[in-house]
Amino acid sequence: MCGICGVVQFGAPADTATVQAMTNALAHRGPDGDGFFFADEVAFGHRRLSVIDLSHAGDQPFASEDGTLQLIHNGEIYNYRELRAELEAKGHRFRSASDTEVVLAAYREWGNACVSRFNGMWAFAIWDAPHRRFFASRDRFGVKPFYYRWDGSRLSFASELKAFRVDRAGGPLRANESMVRDYLGLDRFDHTDETFFAGITKLPPAHCLVLDQTGVRLSRYWQLERRDPPAGDPVEAVRELFLDSVRLRLRADVKVGTALSGGIDSSAVACTVDRLLRTEVTDARPVGDRQATFTAYFDVPGYDERPYAQAVVDRTIADPTWVTFSDHELVGALPAIVEAHDEPFRSTSICAGWFVMRAAHEAGITVVLDGQGGDEVFAGYPAHLPAWYRDLARRGKLATLLRQAGGVGAQRGLPAAAQALGRAFAPATIENYLRGRRSASPALVGPALTAALPTAREHVNSPYTDQLRRLMTRILTVRGLPELLHAEDRNSMAHSIEARVPFLDYRLVELAFSLDARELLDGVTTKKIVRRALADVLPPTVAARTDKLGFATPEAVWMRGALGELAADVFTSTSFRERGFVDADVALARLHAHRSGTIDAGFELWRALNTELWARSFLRATD
């Protein structure tokens, strides 16, 4: 796990000063050293977090033996040992034990197609000197970031947006007003390839970028496709693939821990790590004698998952760390959190991850496994149920539909069942209206954003015709997972930690999307097959959970305390009103009503506050 950056411009000398400054801005991503490559037309910078092969043999930029190829790599290729053996059989020789050298050898052997052979998370760039060609790639789900700015002749790129502050040739950072407007008014974030900064784009997941003298070209190398499910009961296939995914993600030469929320997904990871620790000691060696777990909790009713996390700890050989923080502590940490994330984020639940990663760093952990992706891959959100109901109705499965809705009523009451059915069959205009009432806040949009461009079109590549899988694809690739992975990367790397997500092994994702919906959902039970596949691993109380929290924070409560006091100061400031991103009068009125208990507007008030804190941190040069 590292930080990468660079500038490529044909016919120009290497922009050494810019790349050195950009590399310094990424120091937190790689505290174990830096490295540079400068030549005519290209400049690369790298910050290293040593995880595999801790010797200097793994330092980057990594050059081919003849020096004609230069690679900078952020991430891990988990199947590097298997690929290395295959490449050695083809005559390649290696001088390190790193996965980075495997990436370079794979590019030399298979060219652009090498990325289809990787199982991992990555963002890397290669300078191919003989062909005067720049090649970059990002992993299938965008676990690792890659941002770039292309003006038609000059390409600059980096792992984090903050690095572009010092790219003076690209000009000062300017707000992308369309993205700010979408965030404030529509509660949308990371839903396109645009960023909150005008002119800076992210390389889409599962894409490669090539720059040569003809210009920049992007190409997709992987996407979800319709596949046949495994023969018979798929439980064993899911179980074995998940075990192997965790096994691969334990490959490291540093200490590995686990982020444990108490939900099914993170509990599945922690309990599987424990199983491997008991049965496959060699593979689990980086865990140590006892698995270190890190759990966020709050002494507020409805926000405390300690009973479930404790059940996991009791079942495993675990050394738990319990992490909590007050609204006053959050306010104190907000400048660092806002700086770490580069862009505004949806809620303070993201801040819980920041405190968890800080605790892991203080405990000497370098790699953390996390349950991110389980809901997206195995249909774990409440919104998946109405989509499935629509599919059942379209197929004429009315008896099954009524039975499933009856299960909701039996467990959560008739109003909940009626709501689920209503969401399933309400016209799209009504559903969109209700969704907007739940999360959107168009009244917050200020005068400076009235001329912003229309919302960018969301591109969803889905080969499926059923509503459930089309929704799953959208949540996996456009609306949901991208912003969670963004937060995961920034929270972890702010504390020099590599976060790994076993549920996003592409083999497991392809398997999950091939399954019949009945394997995923059953009445109010989501992720049915995960519960079945890991029934002997999960504590019964966790396996039976039907509620969801996931490091949730008492945001509404805090907005009536110290966080609300900060918001009041910000909303009455001159900069807030003059910037005009947020309608100051509306924000103040909503804050007053919320603090008096008249309304519950914690989420939208956070977005208004976060927007101004972000602007103060990143747009200062243009104020």
Image (cartoon, rainbow, N blue to C red):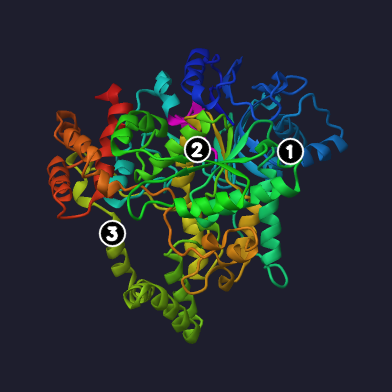
Q: Does residue 197 appear left or right of residue 217 in this picture?
A: left
Report x, y in % for residue 130: 71, 24
Q: Does residue 160 appear left or right of residue 250 in this picture?
A: left
Quadrant of the rendered structure where residue 390 is?
bottom left
Disc 3: which residue = 438
Report x, y in % for residue 450: 21, 44
Amino acid bearing label 3? Arg
Amino acid bearing label 1? Tyr
| Image label count | 3
Disc 2: which residue = 489
Sequence-earlier tag: 1 or 2: 1
Magenta span of residues? 144-161
Sequence-earlier tag: 2 or 3: 3
Disc 1: which residue = 80
Q: Secondary structure at mark 3?
A: helix
Q: Secondary structure at mark 2?
A: helix
Question: Observer-nearest residue: 92 or 238?
Answer: 238
Look at the numbered discs 2 and 3 and tell me whether their residues touch, using CB distance below 8 Å: no
CA–CA distance in space, label 1 to label 2 = 22 Å
Q: If the image is split into quadrants, where does the C terminus sit? A: top left
Report x, y in % for residue 220: 59, 47
Sequence-earlier tag: 3 or 1: 1
For label 3, count other residues whose C-alpha is less than 10 Å away and answer few (under 14), some (14-19) or many (20+).
few
Q: Is residue 503 visible?
A: no
